[in-house]
């Protein structure tokens, strides 16, 4: 979603938030795929393992901040232009407002970010400290 916005709206491409999420995404992917590569080669240096399960503690929140600021910066342009929106009446008899879709996406970070972040913290504990994590039944 964020890349779609950044690629579609030229005015957004100069925002500092875009640089933030791109740097964070780049560092995250370099770390992730280095980890996978070394693991497949059966020669995983501890530093790579450590980086995979520790850098996210800072990078994940920074990436989310960059993404949310980018979406927020795009809202005035999307609202003014009606970008990717479909108004009634039309031959499909369907209405879609991209502006409100972006707001819903931003709001979805509220319940989703903590779930994903705490999942990574549990994974970190399991991998780095060998703790067995027992999931609670609801």
Image: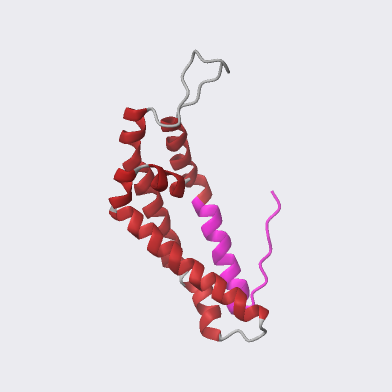
Residue occupying the point 54% across, 70% down: 32
Q: Is residue 73 above or below residue 65?
A: above
Q: Which residues are magenta?
A: 113-138
Would residue 41 appear left or right of 73 to someone viewing this image?
right
Would residue 35 appear left or right of 108 to someone viewing this image?
right
Indicate yes or no whether the magenta region holds residue 93: no
Indicate yes or no whether the magenta region holds residue 119: yes
Residue 95 lies, in percent from the top left, at 51, 21
Residue occupying the point 41% across, 66% down: 58
Viewer-nearest residue: 9 or 42? 9
Q: Is residue 18 above or below residue 130?
A: above
Name the dominant secondary structure of the magenta segment. helix
Q: Is residue 113 above or below residue 134?
A: above
Tell me if residue 53 can be seen.
no
Residue 78 lies, in percent from the top left, at 36, 33
Specify the farthest residue to the right. Answer: 137
Q: Is residue 33 above or below residue 38?
A: above
Residue occupying the point 50% across, 73% down: 31
Specify the farthest residue to the top. Answer: 89
Residue 49 lies, in percent from the top left, at 56, 79
Residue occupying the point 29% across, 51% down: 15
Viewer-nearest residue: 54 or 73? 73
């Amino acid at each position: 979603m964020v890349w779609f916005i950044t690629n579609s709206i030229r005015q957004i491409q100069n925002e500092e938030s875009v640089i933030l999420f791109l740097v964070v995404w780049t560092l995250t992917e370099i770390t992730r795929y280095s980890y996978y590569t070394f693991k497949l080669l059966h020669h995983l240096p501890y530093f790579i393992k450590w980086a995979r399960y520790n850098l996210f503690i800072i990078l994940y929140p920074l990436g989310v901040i960059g993404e949310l600021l980018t979406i927020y910066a795009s809202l005035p342009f999307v609202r003014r232009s009606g970008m990717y929106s479909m108004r009634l009446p039309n031959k499909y008899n369907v209405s879609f407002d991209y502006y409100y879709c972006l707001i819903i996406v931003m709001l979805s970070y509220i319940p989703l970010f903590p779930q994903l972040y705490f999942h990574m913290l549990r994974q970190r504990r399991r991998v780095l400290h060998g703790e067995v994590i027992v999931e609670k039944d609801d």
